Amino acid sequence: GAGVSQSPSNKVTEKGKDVELRCDPISGHTALYWYRQSLGQGLEFLIYFQGNSAPDKSGLPSDRFSAERTGGSVSTLTIQRTQQEDSAVYLCASSADSHKINYGYTFGSGTRLTVV
Amino acid sequence: AQTVTQSQPEMSVQEAETVTLSCTYDTSESDYYLFWYKQPPSRQMILVIRQEAYKQQNATENRFSVNFQKAAKSFSLKISDSQLGDAAMYFCAYMGLLQGAQKLVFGQGTRLTINP
């Protein structure tokens, strides 16, 4: 696609429910990133996928968070048993390859998750 | 670990005037990249300008320029001839080439208001 697409744009869920957030990167981009932006805060790194390599999961805050990337394209971030502190904007970004990441990523518009 | 600090939570400027946003960072690496991103209400992070640490010349993109002081670990953004469309959150970000390579580390952001 022309840009990074994220869905849904907004999600309200009840505490304890599971949610899935989707990211469709720019076609051909091999690197994909998930970041979390809590209210009034900067962006916090969650996870990074590069091609067929094992993902860098070092930023995932707990084992309730997981992500996968199927076929080197679309990625899904899953949060199990959601808590109110999970409320945030979840941003996805992609870049062409590891040699071009210094040009900066292309971000999507994010999913605003609200846990009530 | 690398850290990025933006000491100005909010800034305001009159339309057509110049404003400077501050950013400092901490790293032990000698080669890295620095970025300024803009985040309008649409939530999408937009790359404004980038700087390679090995280049002494300050980057410039139209009305946007940086003052990169490597020894002081300072990376400020100057916006000249401010326009109403410049109103947004601005984030400074660091990307190392060794530790945590390919991850952007963000500051807390500065909210910029343009007064007509």
Image (tube, coloured by chain):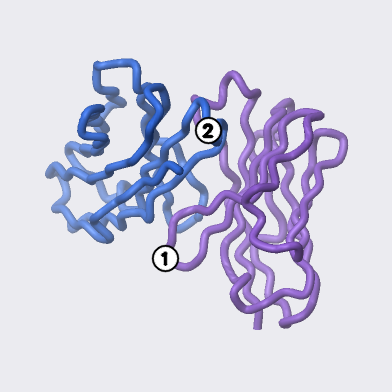
Give the residue number, with chain letter if any, for mark 2: B99
Residue pictured at 36% horizontal, 31% vertical: B49
Residue B60, quarter of picture: top left
Mark 2 belongs to chain: B
| Percent x, y of residue A43 | 49, 53
Give the residue number, with chain letter if any, for mark 1: A40
| Percent x, y of residue A102 | 50, 25
| Percent x, y of residue B15 | 17, 49
Which is more toward the observer, A74 or A35? A35
Which is more toward the observer, B26 or A22? B26
Mark 1 belongs to chain: A
Residue pictured at 14% horizontal, 42% vertical: B18
Which is more toward the observer, B69 or B46? B69
**Chain identifier matching the purple colour in the rendered picture:** A
Residue B9, quarter of picture: bottom left
**Chain identifier matching the blue colour in the rendered picture:** B
Mark 1 vs mark 2, foreground winner is 2
Give the distance between the C-alpha atoms of the residues marked 1 and 2, in whole angstroms.
27 Å
